[in-house]
Image (cartoon, helix red, strand yellow):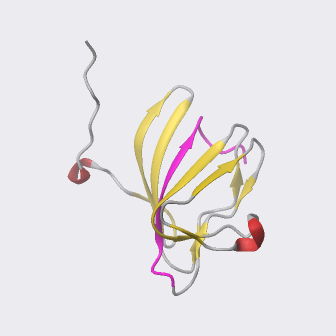
Amino acid sequence: MKSAVTTEPQAQIWETVSEGVTRTVLRAEPGEKRVLIKIAAGHTYPHHAHATPDEVFVVEGVYSDPGVENGRPFAAGSYLYYPPGTDHYASSPAGSGGCTILVWNAGTPAK
């Protein structure tokens, strides 16, 4: 029988991606990666694209991407699927309080 893999909040290592953006890798195996990302209000994750699909689940706060539905805000509980090669401008609108997103993908950005 296999055992569950767990990570307690105090064991998570958060790294700064850019001003107002931090992330922690929850799981990284060949071909799959799970990352929790916090984006402060008015900030944007650096522009990138993936060669493989990218999935985003909004855990809390308000998420937006100017390339998706004219940048309309997505509240907690929203799910977004980015097909391979889709450009990302992950952000949280100014005055929104920021957001936390859970991202699933197969690995590192293509650009």
Q: What's the residue at 59%, 34% (across, down)?
A: 106
Residue 41 is covered by the magenta coloring:
no
Q: Residue furthest bottom?
A: 95
Q: Residue furthest front?
A: 77
Q: Is residue 97 magenta?
A: yes
Quarter of the rendering occupied by the N terminus: top left
Left or right, residue 109 beside residue 36: right
> Which one is nearer the viewer's eye here, 24 or 74?
74
Is residue 2 depicted above or below 88 in this figure? above
Q: Position of residue 96 (x, y in %)?
A: 50, 82
The total number of labels drawn is 0
Viewer-proximal residue, 54 or 44?
A: 54
User: What residue is shown at x 62% (from left), y 64% (from top)?
Assistant: 90
Residue 87: quadrant of the picture: bottom right
Q: Is 54 in front, or is 48?
A: 54
Up the image or down, 75 lies above or below 86; here it is below
| Residue plotted at (74% across, 64% down) | 68
The location of residue 81, given as percent across then percent down, is 66, 49
Which of 77 and 53 lies nearest the eye of the viewer? 77
Q: Residue at x 58, y 79 (%)?
A: 93
Which region is colored magenta? 96-111
Q: Position of residue 70 (x, y in %)?
A: 77, 72
Can you say whether 13 is above or below 47 in the image?
Answer: above
